Amino acid sequence: MNEKVQLSQLSIPTPQDFSFAECLKHLMKPEQEWLYRVIDNSIYKLLKMDDELILFIIEWQPGNIIVKFPLTQPSTIQVKKVTTFISEWFDLEKDLRDFYELANNDPILRPIVQSYYGLRIVGIPHFFEAISWAIIGQQINLTFAYTLKKRLVEKYGESLEYEGNKYYVFPSLEIVASLTVEDLKLLQFSARKAEYIIGIAQLILQGKLSKDLVLKQKTFEQKHLFLTSIRGIGPWTADYVLMKSLQEPTAFPISDVGLHNALKKQLNLDRKPTMAELKELAMNWEGWQAYATFYLWRSL
DNA sequence: GACCAGGATATAG
DNA sequence: CTATATCATGGT
């Protein structure tokens, strides 16, 4: 009996400058998030792997992330995939010392990194989910974006029930690729966004787009260029995806409205910063633009 | 009732 | 190449 419990637990060591509590706070902000659930400082997440739905629970003990599998005995491969997923989700591989040194010499970032020390970029490892979420969020307020995502996930995502709660996975490529624009318009997607998301699902299924294909590009600029060559992915979306799904520390969604508002607040401006001011400020953040942005978002 | 939201594209000049 | 209309609808 004890053995089984032991076998279905997984321990992932975390870096020194990692705050599970700060990441948890980030995860708890959205009120309409259906792709995970936070209960009593534990994160419940459902993943589909090898055609099997796997529910796991993430907890924290100083120095380690503890993962439990309440419903299934995961295979070695599944354990490996979950470990990779969690590592990407919380950007555990990144050494933040250089970022913190840089931030401590930056008048804007200094107070923010002190407030949220240990926060890491909470990513979206699922590539298609990351792109879809970015596209959904284009130009509309976040509340409405979450509503749209919730409708999409509820209607087309597989789910499983555990202890009275329903857990969803993001809709599969196959299902989204087979949808019509009209299907998504029923959920109040704009026709354009419906075309983008369906088209991207089809591109990924055709093997013309994938995380690996992005990673194969040699430089950051080439990755960015590859992504923006795809219909529906502009500069902002490319940076967002590179930041949240590929853990690129130099990704910088410079046109992001949230970033502008955060800087307006930090600089005590009565207007948003101009593009020239943004570029000037960002010169101090060279190499860590994604982290600067993520911490600034948090400051809102 | 404007006006702005985690923008991108199509079209016109 | 730059400028503008369009999108869908919730929040302020």
Image: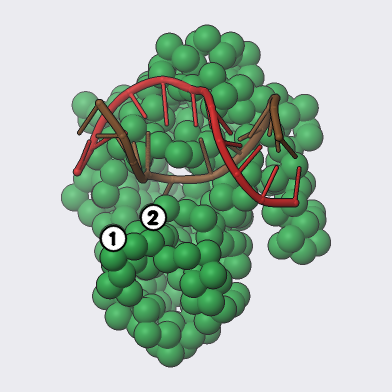
Chain colours: A green, B brown, C red
Amino acid tagged 1: Leu
Contact check, label 2 and label 1, Cβ < 8 Å: yes
**Which numbered circle lies on residue A300?**
1
Quarter of the image with the C terminus of chain A in it: bottom left
Quarter of the image with the N terminus of chain A in it: top left
Q: Residue at x 52, y 64 (%)?
A: A275
**Which numbered circle lies on residue A254?**
none
Residue A158 coordinates in the image, percent (x, y) = 45, 22
Rendered image quadrant of residue A260:
bottom left
**For this view, does A173 lie left or right of residue A15?**
right
Q: Closest to the observer: A251 or A48?
A: A251
Amino acid tagged 2: Gly
Q: Which residue is mark 2?
A: A258
Q: Closest to the observer: A261 or A128?
A: A261
Residue A200 coordinates in the image, percent (x, y) = 66, 30
Q: Chain of mark 1?
A: A
